[in-house]
Image (cartoon, rainbow, N blue to C red):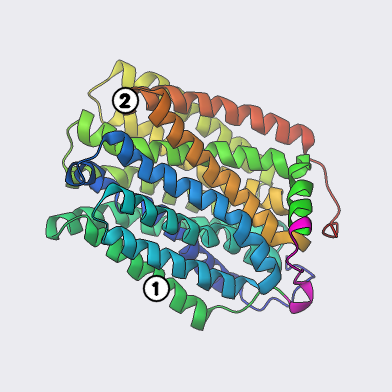
Amino acid sequence: MTSPSTSQPMSARRTAIIGGLMVAAGPLSITLYAPALPTMVADLMTTEAMGKLTLSVYFGAFALAQLVCGPLSDRFGRKPVAMAFFALYVLGSFAAALAPSIEMLLLGRALQGVGVSAGVALSRAMVRDQFVGSESIRILTLINLILTVAPAVAPTLGSVLLLAGSWHLLFVVMAGFGMAIIAMLAWGARETQPVAAQTPLKPSRILANYGRLLASAQFMAPALLLAIAFGGFYGFSALLPFVLLDDLGLTTFQFAMTMLIQTGSFITGNLVAGQVARRASGLQMVRIGLVLLVLAGLGFAIGPRLFPDSLFAVMIPVGLWMLALAFIGPSTTAAAMAGFGTIAGAAGALTGVFQVGGGFIGSTLASVLFPDARSAIVTLLPIMAGLAVLAALWRRISARPVAEAPPET
């Protein structure tokens, strides 16, 4: 169903394609260079902990920048703000490509994180500007499906690029992808937010709108579930290179092939979820995802301990987790934003903060609390699966229809 507040300047397909490519920059900036992490650590003469910090810095900037990106888009429109932020992403990519030290690499990663924040926050706002209800869930599902294309080919592409050159080349490729997104926005996208709906950029209003979202159980319950589910994904994305390459001794190319299990599961899950969404409610979609998430958590807790040398003891739980995300992600995102169309930019930004912030917390805890990646993956992921169930129970208790309300003044 099309939102009554807009004249639908873009079709559902165009919105999904543009939104999907914007969002894809986020995981692309993780999975493309993941095979190079051990090499980068050795090349820059730093430690494994500092290598993981390049992920934590990226996640932190990614999460926090959305708090600024969303309100800016509510004031100036989705399209110009998205183009400006992706320009920062390109700048950060080149800074990382030319980095002579770990400090410069961290700076480049921080700029990349700021830039890609526009992908998550503004793609959701673009959907909410134009569509509501089951149609918005289907579009978000399609965005998730498009999102899987870049991570599916990125590890393999990264491995091939490493055979052809150094890890610096990976960041040049990221810069090229960022420039392609800017060109797509310039010539293929239309502004989805009506001029009349643009709100003044006042700090007091921004804080009041965020406070309104944080005080709403309708927003917080699905946002927390989204944070935990995707936090687990970003958490094991940071850990898998060290588990598979260092502990199990895979080559870079074998790692790339193994990661197709992860992306293949996500693609399959999105295809199935897209069909199920036509007949099932959002709550039913979440229930299916939770069952898969619990199975994944049990798999992480048991499999690597019973079969420490088995690749599939690690990757089967990874596949189950990715299947779960396909069912949980679109439904919880749509539920979190459903009653906040007048501040869709802020709502989209804050859901992104929760989603990526979960990854920041997960990857940071994995680096700080555990002696190695294997210990983290068999302990942290089962805990997060249990927390997801608790968040879903709160979501069910607090789920009530809420009428659209105007933003705070």
State the residue at coordinates (24%, 55%): 158
Q: Is residue 21 left or right of residue 217?
A: left
**Could one spot residue 345 in this view of the protein?**
yes
What's the residue type where badge 1 is placed?
Met
Determine if the magenta segment contains residue 103. no
Mark 2 or mark 1, which is nearer the start of the sequence? 1
Residue at the top extreme of this rendering? 306
State the residue at coordinates (25%, 34%): 244
State the residue at coordinates (66%, 79%): 9
What's the residue type where badge 2 is placed?
Asp
Q: Which mark is residue 336?
A: none
SS of the residue at dot 1?
Answer: helix
Residue at the bottom extreme of this rendering? 187
State the residue at coordinates (48%, 61%): 115
Find disc 2 in the rendering and name its residue.
372
SS of the residue at dot 2?
Answer: loop
Nearer to me, 251 or 205: 205
In three-dimensional space, the C-alpha distance between marks 1 and 2, rounded to whole angstroms, equals: 37 Å
Compared with 137, 317 (above or below) is: above
Residue 235 falls in image quadrant: top left
Work out which quarter of the rendered image holds the C terminus and state it.
bottom right
Q: Which mark is residue 179?
A: 1
Nearer to me, 328 or 251: 251
Other residues around mark 2 within 10 Å, as few (<14) / some (14–19) / many (≥20):
some
Residue 26 falls in image quadrant: bottom left
**Could one spot residue 135 in this view of the protein?**
no
Q: x, y (%) of residue 335?
A: 70, 48
Compared with 289, 350 (above or below) is: below
Compared with 192, 343 (above or below) is: above
Work out which quarter of the rendered image holds the N terminus and state it.
bottom right
Magenta span covers which residues? 194-204
